[in-house]
Image: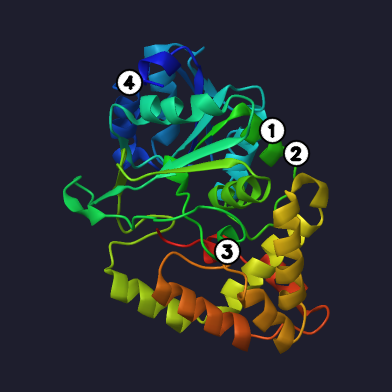
Amino acid sequence: MSASAASGRVITILLSTFNGAPFLAEQLDSFLAQTHRNWVLYWRDDGSADDTVRIMRGFARRIGADRCIESPGSGPHLGARASFLGLLAQARSAEIVAFADQDDVWLPDKLARAAAQIEPHGLHPALYCGRQYLVDEKLSGLGLSILHRGDAGFPASLTQNIAAGNTLVMNAAAVALVTSLGQPDVSMHDWWCYITLSAAGGAIMFDAQPQVLYRLHKTNLVGTARPAYARAWGALRRGPQRYMAAMRRHADALAAEPARLTPQARADLKLVEAALHGDLLARITALRCPRLRRRTRLETLLFGYWFLTVPPPPRGVAKAVQGLSAVEFREVK
């Protein structure tokens, strides 16, 4: 289906803002430049102390209050995860939902391209995500985010998030699925959407052609302009404990909703759950699942080593991670 064929769908853009004044205007202008013009913007401010709210309300006056709608819950600082989830809950009746970060810039065909790929799936849950152009504060090119190759499914989604929130677009069926489930409090909204959709048999589409300029700067919530070896070294320094704790919490949350999963996902999750809470033999058995892997062979080897060598915490200790920030469990794309 062509981009123009999907142009009748109203796309609801969800934008959470927080002290975004330096870059926000360029993102808003990129919304106006979209070739898919049938969109509405829902936004929520997360406690900004700069001119962000003034800029957003000025944008609403510019394009009309019916197209730029401020959340009634705007104002209190909740953090990005809770702020975006609140917006998603308000968009339950939307035809298509697109997450947006305040400091990026979208290319003109971003919404049209996503809508064209989602539309053929009809009432079946579908999630679109993709690669990004990495740029600095002045939008000068730094490179490309990692290209995902191969199947994007479950239980690989438990090991790694490929659905960057600033590229993520979902249809109504996917929104209904995600908002009907609880979410681990250590998970960012984008990763949990990807996990949920993949486990429930939803369609996952990864676009190799970037449609977002992902601005990397010192105040990024997540992500820095570091080379791959530096990011890898950072992950090694942080160690596997937090990573494995997040995986355990994600798996446990899914295990509480078995009826939502496909038969294959339920079988795979049973293996993973037994491994995450069991002995070495259970972990070896789970690693034999060909679908339990990360994006590259090297990443999969490191994951396998951590999976085998990090034992489950003693009973009751797992709850200790509940107070940690969701950002600590989000991977840089």
Marks 1/4 in contact by CB < 8 Å: the verdict is no
- Disc 4 to disc 2, how far (Cα)? 32 Å
Where residue 262 appears, as percent x and y from the top left, is: 72, 48
Q: Which mark is residue 331?
A: none
Q: CA distance from mark 3 to mark 1?
A: 26 Å
Mark 4 or mark 2: which comes first in sequence?
4
Measure how far apart labels 1 and 4 are at the Cα level.
Answer: 27 Å
From the viewer's perspective, is the residue at label 4 or at label 2 nearer?
2
Q: Secondary structure at mark 4?
A: helix
Q: Residue 291 shows which numbered tag?
A: 3
- Mark 2 or mark 3, which has the lower sequence index? 2
**Label 2 secondary element:** loop
Q: Position of residue 185 (x, y in %)?
A: 68, 57
Nearest to the eye among marks 2 and 3: give it: 3
Q: Is residue 133 left or right of residue 263?
A: left
Whether label 4 touches label 2, CB < 8 Å: no
Q: Mark 1 against mark 4, which lies toward the viewer?
A: 1
Q: Secondary structure at mark 3?
A: loop
Which of pointers 1 and 4 lies earlier in the amino acid sequence? 4
At a point 41% along the width and 73% down the height, the residue shown is 297
| CB-based contact (under 8 Å), mark 1 and mark 2 | yes
Q: Earlier in the sequence, mark 3 or mark 4?
A: 4
**For numbered disc 1, what is the local secondary structure?**
helix
Q: What residue did someone put label 1 on?
A: 176
Report if residue 49 is visible in the image: no
- Quadrant in which the N terminus appears: top left
Q: Residues within 10 Å of mark 3 (few under 14, many from 20)?
A: some
